[in-house]
Amino acid sequence: MEIVTRQYKVYEFKELSEDAQEKAIEELYDINADYDWWDCTEEDAKIIGLDITEFDLNRNTIKGKFLIDAKDIADDIVESHGKLCKTHQIAKRYLEQIALLGEDENSELTPEDLDEEFEFELLAEYLSILRDEYEYITSREGIVETIENNEYRFTSDGSLFR
């Protein structure tokens, strides 16, 4: 039995030519999206009491429901999400509207109307968060970051060394 030894010259991504880098990116275009990449965002929503039941970035749709009282969700968001975060701004506005509603006896709005609007706005913001996340993980920058962080190696033409 003859033992054959082969040697290969492999390269880090940054060592590849521009064309080889482009080939590597094309080959690994779905490296960050071939799993349930949305889990962390859905879990973040669930922590505050919002259950995202489905979403479709291509159709720009999202569905979900509050798991607890809307006011409790808003209070939690205001406490735990930073002031610059859009979810914080949405929750703060909702709490202000609820407070004003209690003072305005002539308002045609009901607390349920405000709850529905809050849920709609919060779901819309989470759809935006999911879209931004997807756009990043499928971007050139996101793909290169994964390649470099995982120290992938390539042949000179940009093919993944396996």
Image (cartoon, grey):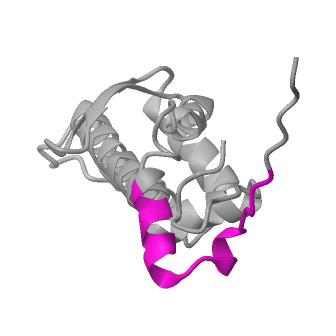
Residue 146: x and y in percent read 64, 57
Residue 112: x and y in percent read 26, 31
Q: With 146 as the anchor, is 111 left or right in this view? A: left
Q: Is residue 45 above or below residue 23?
A: above
Question: Outermost residue, bottom direction?
Answer: 18
Q: Which residues are magenta?
A: 7-26
Determine if residue 99 is in view.
Answer: no
Q: Is residue 8 magenta?
A: yes
| Quadrant location, the C terminus | top right
Q: Residue at x 43, y 64 (%)?
A: 23
> How many numbered marks appear?
0
Q: Is residue 43 above or below residue 122?
A: above
Q: Which residue is more in the foreground, 55 or 151?
A: 151
Q: Residue at x 88, y 29 (%)?
A: 3
Q: Is residue 40 above or below residue 9?
A: above
Q: Which residue is more in the foreground, 70 or 36?
A: 36
Residue 109: x and y in percent read 17, 43
Q: Residue at x 18, y 46 (%)?
A: 60
Q: Main secondary structure of the magenta part?
A: helix
Q: With 149 as the anchor, is 137 left or right in this view? A: left
Q: Which residue is more in the foreground, 102 or 64?
A: 64
Determine if residue 27 is in view.
Answer: yes
| Quadrant location, the N terminus | top right
The part of the image, by quadrant, that contains residue 90 is bottom left
Q: With 106 as the anchor, is 89 left or right in this view? A: right
The part of the image, by quadrant, that contains residue 129 is bottom left
Q: Is residue 11 magenta?
A: yes
Residue 67: x and y in percent read 48, 20
Q: Residue at x 63, y 56 (%)?
A: 81
